[in-house]
Image (cartoon, rainbow, N blue to C red):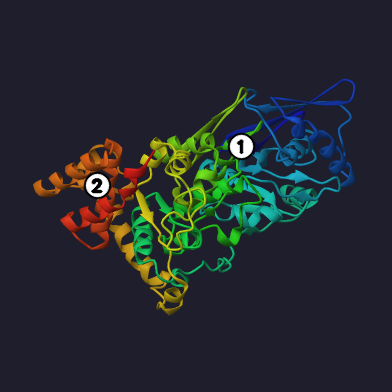
Amino acid sequence: MTLAVSYGRALAGVQAPLVSVEVHLANGLPSLSIVGLPEAAVKESKDRVRGALLNCRFDFPTRRITINLAPADLPKEGSRFDLPIAIGILAASAQIPSEALEHYEFVGELALGGALRPVAGVLPTALHARDAGRTLVVPEDNAAEATLVEGLKVLAAPDLLALCAHLNGLGELAPVTRSEAAAPPALPDLRDVRGQPHARRALEIAAAGAHPLLMLGPPGTGKTLLASRLPSILPPMSEQEALESAAVRSLSSQAFRIEAWAQRPFRAPHHTASGVALVGGGTQPRPGEISLAHHGVLFLDELPEFDRKVLEVLREPLESGNITISRAARQAEYPARFQLVAAMNPCPCGYLGHPSARCRCTAEQVQRYRARISGPLLDRIDMHVEVPPVPPGALHAAEPGEDSAAVRARVIAARARQLARADKPNAQLEGAEVERHCILDGSDRALLDSAADRLGLSARAYHRILKVARTIADLAEAEHIETSHLAEAIGYRRLDRTAP
């Protein structure tokens, strides 16, 4: 047979479109050409494939070999096509049966000796292979990642020889099953935070309703400590959320760890990060920090120190929960349903309002410092909480607060009420959903209207107060929003009075 087809998958954002690797052998001078928009790494695969086949003692056809990667208008990149190309050549030259290839998908990089090396982005590939009903063949080092997908048959091959023996019926690769997951790394416990009851309360509310949170206070008051404890009180991820989050991290090999695949990510980029680092991009688009924090926490410390243009890129993802990266040749869409937690000092020196009275910043300097954060971005942050300094003596004398397990139990119960009521956390309620689930009586509506006039709140901020009040009511196991819940929610917008 001079024509054979094997199957692999490309990467387009978190999607993995099917690629048919068509191999045709024709008479003529020996040559090998690859068509179908291959990038440099794909073009180089012909040399890796030739070396692997010869070193594994296969016959390399001395004919005119044409390899078409279909669909031809989809860009192909990376070394993931080495294995399906090699299998296609062997099938076209009748060294392995071509009939069985219909039921397999292949992904992997070939070493010159025939060994299979791991590639990035196996989890999105596995999800789509399962939906297509095919068996996925991967390098051994990618097997644990592929087995995270339930209902998928996975074969892990150490090298090309073992795989061809399996396809020829001369050996068998046993299906790989998901191994018992190692215990995920222990998360920092909220019990480490002493004092700051108001900030702890705000952190619990933010966790229960998935609300964005801004903490303002002098250096050393525990803002970073509090933010780092947020993942320990968040509800566990569902299987679907874990797979979505892991699929994004799978595209970035440095960010993906099998043992922590179902643990909510916590990303804390430095304030020198660029807009591309946050939203993703590059010549070949890759996910940025906001996508790597999908279903987790994005912590921005020293918020005003970020470039203002960088911060502005957060506005659309905060509302939509996804990010689309457009380049001249291609477009990629990544999910970005993250929970924003930010921290900032009250002034350039950081000590405005500190008992030491060491701050010498003028009102103009303070205003200019806070103006680095735009009003529209500040408006999208549901909760603003002040974290005041605590004297060292009082800090050491304070009893440890509740541990993360106790707080998390209340958060899980509150989140369960939200999912049962609206199938989403309160922070994600939109439009009519807010009016339907955040009902106020006449006096409470008048209270909120008065606060909105006094603080100069926008319609967006008005609705966000309602959503925070609904979360506070859920934590209190209340059926309806009460005056105390609404008053507390209004208290978390007091910084709007000093917003630029």
What's under tag 1, amino acid-wise? Answer: Leu
Q: Nearer the viewer, residue 140 or 169?
A: 140
- Where is residue 178 shown, x and y percent of the image? 58, 61
Left or right relative to 158: residue 296: left
On screen, residue 225 above or below 283:
below
Q: Nearer the viewer, residue 464 or 452?
A: 452
> In the rendered image, which residue does mark 2 sit on?
466
**Residue 420 in view here:** no
- Where is residue 265 shown, x and y percent of the image? 52, 55
Q: Residue at x 80, y 50 (%)?
A: 115
The crowd level at tag 1 (other Cα within 10 Å; few <14, some 14-19, many 20+) is many
Q: Residue at x 54, y 44 (%)?
A: 305
Which of disc 2 and disc 1 is earlier in sequence?
1
> In the rendered image, which residue does mark 1 sit on?
11
Q: Nearer the viewer, residue 389 or 315?
A: 389
What's under tag 2, amino acid-wise? Answer: Leu
Which mark is nearer the camera, 1 or 2? 2
Kindly indicate whether the residue at mark 2 contacts the one at mark 1 (C-beta within 8 angstroms): no
Q: Name the element at disc 2.
A: helix
Left or right relative to 398: residue 75: right
Q: Nearer the viewer, residue 313 or 265?
A: 313
Classify the position of the N terminus by image quarter: top right
Q: Residue at x 28, y 55 (%)?
A: 471
Q: Residue at x 42, y 75 (%)?
A: 394
